[in-house]
Amino acid sequence: MICNKIPVQDEQQLTHYHQTITDSLKRLQTDVIDVMMIHWPVKDESLLRANLEALRQEQQRGTIRAVGVSNFATATLEIAREIGLIVVANEFAYNLVSRAMEETVLPYCRKQQIGVLAYMPLMQGLLTGKFASLDDLPPNRRRTIHFDSRYQPLARHGGSGAEKELTALLRTMADIKTNSGIEPAVQAIAWLTAQPGVTSVIAGCRTLDQLQANADAAETELPEALLNKLNQASRPILSQLSGQLDLWQLNDKSRIW
Ligand SMILES: NC(=O)c1ccc[n+]([C@@H]2O[C@H](COP(=O)([O-])OP(=O)(O)OC[C@H]3O[C@@H](n4cnc5c(N)ncnc54)[C@H](OP(=O)(O)O)[C@@H]3O)[C@@H](O)[C@H]2O)c1
């Protein structure tokens, strides 16, 4: 199956949308893309509607089989529903330290039967247990709202982070590994696949070993007691981050709506 993403196109780009899609088909050496997703919504509602309409037209022309979105919360998903467009998938940041979608987005997707593709399941390696402390993470992996922006030159969110809570979760995951032998990366991915509504997990892999380990993790079922422990240990992070959906921007700068 081929899934692809397209950024929101501006008015001028919309005039040659079909060409953009056919260029993509050529590059992928295929006649049809199974799921074409809008990468991020924009605040301009009429432009967003026009882009959703453009995708619908491509679907009618047969260049794409189904329409998907990424980083859409309930208001933007509702726009698609209002215009009668069936959205089959929403690719969204979801992992043990980024659980904000559980409040409204995940229940909405379950109700509307929209598949959820959880991205960044390992929080860019943080949840694998290979970093002894948060300070060992490369600076470009400390840009998200989890880290106090005062001390992160690459962060642009301005928030105070949740580092104490992150450290506590990592300690719990290390304890689980000591007691059960289950690697933190396996705990993180298997916890995600156990969440109702999650239909797929998109893990980045730099090596074949990581690919194999992550594929195995997706087949792993964690005992209920471990799932509960991870739920409990990760909840303080969710509270500290006050349900923010955009991992890189806060409050009125959030791009997700
Ligand atoms: N739709 C969107 O807006 C959006 C945004 C971001 C990402 N995504 C998608 O989500 C995918 C995954 O995100 P991501 O790669 O940023 O984060 P991730 O999947 O949470 O982390 C992947 C990184 O963790 C390390 N890793 C992976 N498996 C490991 C293992 N078994 N043991 C130890 N380390 C392991 C690797 O980096 P090192 O080996 O270098 O440590 C790898 O690059 C991306 O490829 C992208 O397709 C989508």
Image: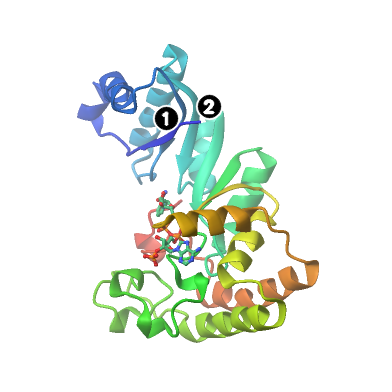
Q: Is residue 103 visible?
A: no
Where is residue 173? Give x, y as percent.
61, 78
Three-letter amino acid code at the position of disc 2:
Leu
- Determine whether, in the image, residue 236 is placed left or right of residue 209: right
Residue drawn where x is 60% and y is 65% of the image:
186
Disc 1 residue: CB within 8 Å of ligand 1: no
Where is residue 20? Give x, y as percent.
27, 25
Identify the image's colour scheme: rainbow, by chain, secondary structure or one colour: rainbow
Label placed on residue 85? 2
Quadrant assignment, res 19: top left
Question: Circle 1 — which element?
Answer: helix
The one of 36 and 79 positioned closer to us in this rendering: 36
Q: Is residue 221 visible?
A: yes
Quadrant assignment, res 151: bottom left
What distance separates the C-alpha of mark 1 from that of mark 2? 8 Å
Disc 2 residue: CB within 8 Å of ligand 1: no
Question: Going from the N terminus, do you reach mark 1 or mark 2 first?
Answer: 1
Q: Using the image, determine if residue 204 lies above or below residue 47.
A: below
Where is residue 217? Give x, y as percent.
61, 58
- Determine whether, in the image, residue 222 is placed left or right of residue 106: right
Label placed on residue 52? 1
Question: How busy is the neighbourhood of tag 1: few (under 14 within 10 Å), some, or many (20 plus)?
Answer: many
Quarter of the rendered structure image containing ligand 1: bottom left
Question: How busy is the neighbourhood of tag 2: few (under 14 within 10 Å), some, or many (20 plus)?
Answer: some
Residue drawn where x is 29% and y is 22% of the image:
26
Residue drawn where x is 49% and y is 30% of the image:
67
Do residues under tags 1 and 2 come within 8 Å of each other at their CB atoms? yes
The extreme front residue here reads: 209
Q: Using the image, determine if residue 9 lies above or below residue 142.
A: above
Three-letter amino acid code at the position of disc 1:
Leu
- Determine whether, in the image, residue 32 is placed left or right of residue 96: left
